[in-house]
Image: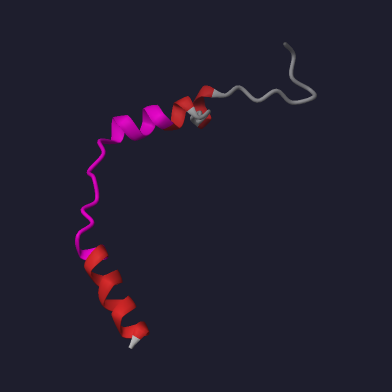
Amino acid sequence: MGFGLGLIIATLLMLSYFPRNIPKYVIEKQARDLGMRYEDEIKAFFKNDTK
């Protein structure tokens, strides 16, 4: 009885959830605020490189 009721409640909660469509530029801005960098923005220095 309790398990079935829990499944029904969980199903109703999941059906009422609507995912937000976040634009890609907003996701990228949030990621950059958290420290994300693209590979071509980073200069890697190796031992034999001259600076």
Query: Quadrant location of residue 30?
Result: top left
Marks counted in the figure total 0
Residue sitting at x 25%, y 36%? 23
Left or right: where does residue 12 sit relative to residue 38? left
20 magenta-colored: yes
Colouring mode (rainbow / by chain / secondary structure / one colour) = secondary structure
Left or right: where does residue 2 sit relative to residue 43? left
Work out whether 23 lies above or below 2.
above
Residue sitting at x 38%, y 27%? 29
Query: Quadrant location of residue 17?
Result: bottom left
Residue sitting at x 36%, y 83%? 2
Work out whether 29 lies above or below 9.
above
The residue most toward the bottom is 1
The residue most toward the top is 51
Image position, residue 5 (x, y; %): 29, 80
Q: Nearer the viewer, residue 5 or 30?
A: 5
The residue most toward the right is 47
Image position, residue 12 (x, y; %): 22, 68
Left or right: where does residue 36 sit relative to residue 1? right
Q: Quadrant of the N terminus?
A: bottom left
Image position, residue 41 (x, y; %): 51, 23
Question: Which residues make up the magenta segment?
Answer: 14-30
Q: Quadrant of the C terminus?
A: top right
